[in-house]
Amino acid sequence: MTVSDSIFTTTASSQRLEPGSFNIQAAPWPQGTTNASVDASATANKIIDSFNQALSSKDLKALASLFLQDGYWRDHLALTWTLRTLKGRDKILSFLSQNQSFPLKRVEINSSSDFRKPQLTPFAPSGGSKGIGFFITFTTQHGSGRGMVRLVEGADGEWKIWTFYTALDELNGHKEPLGANRPEGVKHGATPGRRNWADRRRDEENFADSEPDVLIIGAGQGGLTAAARLKMLNVTSLIIDKNDQIGDNWRKRYHQLVLHDPVWYDHMPYQEFPKFWPIYTPKDKLADWFESYAKLLELNVWMKSEIVSSSWDDETKQWTVVVRRVRVDGREETRTLKPKHIVLATGHSGKKYLPSIPGMDGFKGLLCHSSEFPGAKETNGNSKKRAIVVGACNSSHDICQDYYEKGYQVTMVQRSSTCVVSAEASIKVNVGVLYSEFGPPVEDADVWLWGWPSEVFKAIHTDLCKVQIEHDAELLTGLSKAGFKVDKGVNDAGLFSKYIQRGGGYYIDVGTSKLIIDGKVGIKSGVEITEVTAHGLRFSDGTELEADEVVFATGYENMRTQAGGILGEDVQRRVGDIWGWDEEGEIRTIWRESGHPGVWFHGGNLALSRYYSKVLALQIKARLEGLV
């Protein structure tokens, strides 16, 4: 079945970005080689040998000449202590010339597996544009890392670097205690007054006679992954969270919530989900996993805790933070902590966004934001119960499905178009074999994925969006006929790019789309809400809908608003806007210097938290070691 372009919305709202961010355009695909017999290994070795010769002789022009004229060098902490994407031979040469003390020392090809070794491969999902791709390892003045190189053949038959990716993985002298480097765990012999592991662990968690280097706010996937990475770098951290239990940030969400991303994409650092884990994780199961994760990795977490006051000292480069907590034994206490860094890990969004609409205070039933939705109640056969859900993305769909299953008459109010992908297409097309049961190790998959500059990443997802639309043709056509407005994401680049560029505006279909197509969930689209009445909503076209319950699945404000609410308005003023691409295609402010010393942001889905937690932890460790 072929999908007509006419069903897709192309209004300004479908192209909306995070304010102030850049709309990076998709890169054109380079001409691919037609030489199927090319020796990939010999070609890769020739390029890397020339690269290393130029490095050792500091011949920067020769090094830059190895790149295509419009080639890319994406760097995560190997060249500088921040995140950069240098586009074009001239910009690469200019950067290297202005930073001649850059620490990169040597690059090696990594041929330790079939997935990593040099091989001829198509770069574009649609086929064509073949080149040579391979993994690398490298050393710098400060440590070592991993990366990915993609080569293309020019019209003159000469192979050049199209994309080059370097990501610092380890600091010299600070090897993670893994595998052969694991701790011994015991000191044999007679030691008077010796305390056992449980005693020491209790003191460590309570910071009985010590201070955390890093205070992490939030015990979700962001806070836990940041703490895990810091622990492996021997950086002491403390997570605080106002909830009762670890995992409550998921446990307290609406009753039927299940993750929309598959398990292979969601693994956490150092402790992957077990082989028996379901493909899609229920929220309560994930919450329990978070509790187990914190215990297994011996992370320091204070629940039922919140900041009372905080202040930053520019001279000592240290925070003074007063924390009020309820201990495990029920005793309340107030502690003053002196961390050098604070990580805000409260999600990639900020405060809930609840629009101000006349009449909200006069509504007679339940009216709440989706973050406060308690779950639909059984109607016991009373089919006259009515609900309205305002919004048309993941949360709205899940809540509508919950209402339908409990017997409500439910209507979704769609304010702007939605990028819809079926769960099946999400696995088969968007995630593909990269994150799958028989895919490469997740660390290799991350290098492969994040090794693409954002312009190429967007080109890949523009191609994948076409494949996904054909896969979901019947679904998308049915939604359009039902009055539900669908789009292809920003510049037709699909769901993943929309997530990065806007932080929302999409739905991975796990069942609600069929309810909409079959008329079991009503749709009200293309009109604005003008008033909340005592028993429903009034719209700009003069129509009204009656309801016993109204849920606003209207999203969240920018993450920087959380900084103001937690650390004060001065911090909020100084930090930059978060999310969306900067002019180079790196995500703004999060996982990098925020604009305020000693303040970092960490968030996103489990996959982003897994990869960027290491990027964040290495930057903090480097500062604690005086490398920055």
Image (spheres, rainbow, N blue to C red):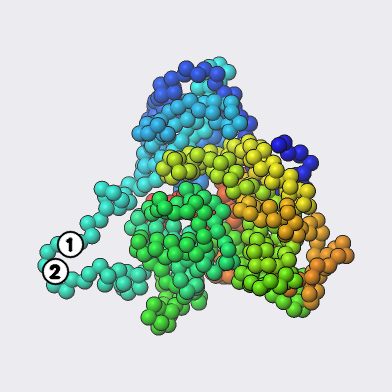
**Depth order, front residue of 551/616:** 551
Report the residue that reaches farthest toward the front: 381
Counting from the top left corner in percent of width and height, residue 323 is at 46, 75
Query: Does residue 39 appear left or right of residue 379 in this picture?
Result: left
Residue density around tag 2, few if under 14, some if 14–19, many if 20 or more, within 10 Å: few
Identify the residue at horizontal 35%, vertical 55% (top origin).
232
Q: Is residue 232 visible?
A: yes
Label for residue 187? 1
Query: Does residue 192 appear left or right of residue 204 in this picture?
Result: left
Identify the residue at horizontal 42%, vertical 34% (top origin).
115
Identify the residue at horizontal 39%, vertical 45% (top origin).
169
Identify the residue at horizontal 66%, vertical 43% (top origin).
472
Label for residue 191? 2
The CA distance from mark 2 to mark 1 is 9 Å
Q: Looking at numbered disc 1 in the image, what kind of residue is underneath it?
A: Lys
Tag 2 secondary structure: loop
Counting from the top left corner in percent of width and height, residue 156 is at 55, 16
**Depth order, front residue of 59/53:** 53
Tag 1 secondary structure: loop
Q: Looking at numbered disc 2 in the image, what kind of residue is underneath it?
A: Thr
